[in-house]
Amino acid sequence: RFLTNELVQDLTLDHLEMAKRILKEHCLVGFLDQMEESMDRFESYYFPNTHNNDGVQLEPSPQKECRDRFINWGWNNRQSYPAVQEHTTAYELLYRKNEYDILLYEYAQTELWHEQGILVQQNMKDQHQQMASLNSATIHKNKKKTMKVKQ
């Protein structure tokens, strides 16, 4: 509802498709049950120079201690609720009320998670290629300056 700004009327498949598009174009998704990989993605996407092309951290980053505390914070201590059995009235009511949220979550957890994993890897490779080009250009420029000074 919030992604499509439809807070009152019934949702439709059009709203679901719009929400999928918004997630795909504007969000980098992560999941609590994949916390470490999610944090790896966030860090390598937003701080690409701290990871190699394979997503492996080059050296301890300044945010590593904070990140490790966050990952190991104890998410298992969150509130637990009893499971609702399928084919019960409660299950059917919850499903109908949250059907599009469930479909959006399933999309994010499967298709979008996979696509973004590829994009994050490509982003890191592009960043490293840019850095290599800049370093090469700087070295070339410095060689020219050195040659002029010697003459």
Image (cartoon, helix red, strand yellow):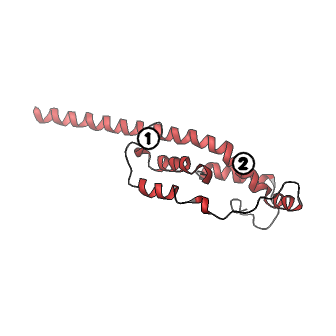
For the C terminus, the quadrant is: top left
User: Is 140 or 20 nearer to us in this picture?
Assistant: 20
In the image, what residue occupies the spot 75% across and 63% down? Answer: 6
Residue ID at (78%, 59%): 98
Q: Residue furthest left?
A: 151
Quarter-of-image position of residue 7:
bottom right
The amino acid on which the numbered mark 1 sits, given as a three-letter code, is Gln
Alpha-carbon span between mark 2 and mark 1: 30 Å
Q: Which residue is mark 1?
A: 127
Q: Earlier in the sequence, mark 2 or mark 1?
A: 2
Would you name the residue on which mark 2 appears?
A: 106
* Amino acid type of the residue that numbered disc 2 sits on in the rendered structure: Glu
Left or right of 123: which side holds 142? left
What label sits on residue 140 in the rendered view?
Answer: none
x and y percent of residue 95 in the render?
A: 82, 57
**Disc 2 secondary structure class:** helix
Q: Where residue 84 sits: x, y (%)?
A: 80, 59
Which residue is situated farthest in the bottom direction here? 8
Picture coordinates of residue 57 (x, y %)?
42, 43
Side of 69 where 75 appears, left or right: right
